[in-house]
Image (cartoon, grey):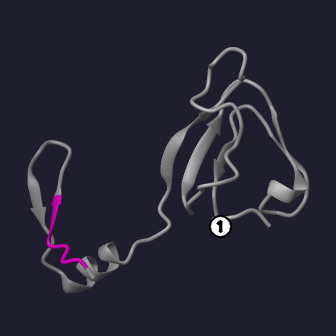
Amino acid sequence: MADISKIKLPNGQSYNIKDTTARDAISGLSGAMVFKGTVGKATSGSGTVSAIPTSSVQIGHTYKIVDENKSIAAANSQTGAAVTAKVGDTIVATATTPK
């Protein structure tokens, strides 16, 4: 486990974490959300990707649907059912492979 004893704040200052329990909790975080980009129309190039990724996915990868609803086949859905992601929805991977 990494020794987490300082956090660099947005203003550039370092904050010392003195509490061992807090350091252990911070260093144990996993599966945090990681914003990967936006999903948009392939024809307009409005998103960073045109389809919700189904491979090379890690837990926490997050995408925002930006300009058209996206159908997700049951084979690629974490729920195991076909679903539609609507404009404004945020998609967060909860597993590395679809069900």
Quarter of the image holding residue 94?
bottom right
Residue 23: x and y, percent? Answer: 24, 78
* Residue at image coords 77%, 26%: 68
Residue at the spot 70% in from the left edge and 43% down from the top edge: 52
Vertical position of residue 12 compared to residue 30: above or below: above
Q: Is 35 left or right of 27, judged from the image as shown?
A: right
Circle 1 sits in a helix, a strand or a loop, which is it?
A: loop
Q: What's the residue at 66%, 28% (across, down)?
A: 66
In the rendered image, the quadrant that contains the C terminus is bottom right
Find residue 44 and report its horizontal and vertical position in percent.
Answer: 68, 14
60 with respect to 13 (left or right):
right
Where in the figure is residue 24, as x and y percent of width and height? Answer: 28, 82
80 up-or-down from 85: above or below: below
The image quadrant of residue 81 is bottom right
Rendered view: 71 above or below 78:
above
Left or right placement of residue 11 versus residue 43 in this view:
left
Q: Tell me: residue 46, above or below residue 36.
A: above
Q: Is 52 or 68 nearer to us in this picture? A: 52
Identify residue for label 1. 95
**How many numbered marks, from 0 up?**
1
Say few, some or many: other residues with alpha carbon within 10 Å of mark 1 (under 14 / 14 to 19 / 20 or more).
Answer: some
Residue closest to the eye, 32 or 22: 32
What is the magenta range?
2-7
Looking at the rendered structure, the kind of residue marked 1 is: Ala
- Secondary structure that dominates the magenta span: loop
The verdict on residue 3 being magenta is: yes
Seen from the viewer's position, the closer of residues 76 and 11 is 76
Q: Quadrant of the N terminus?
A: bottom left
In the image: residue 67, left or right of residue 16: right
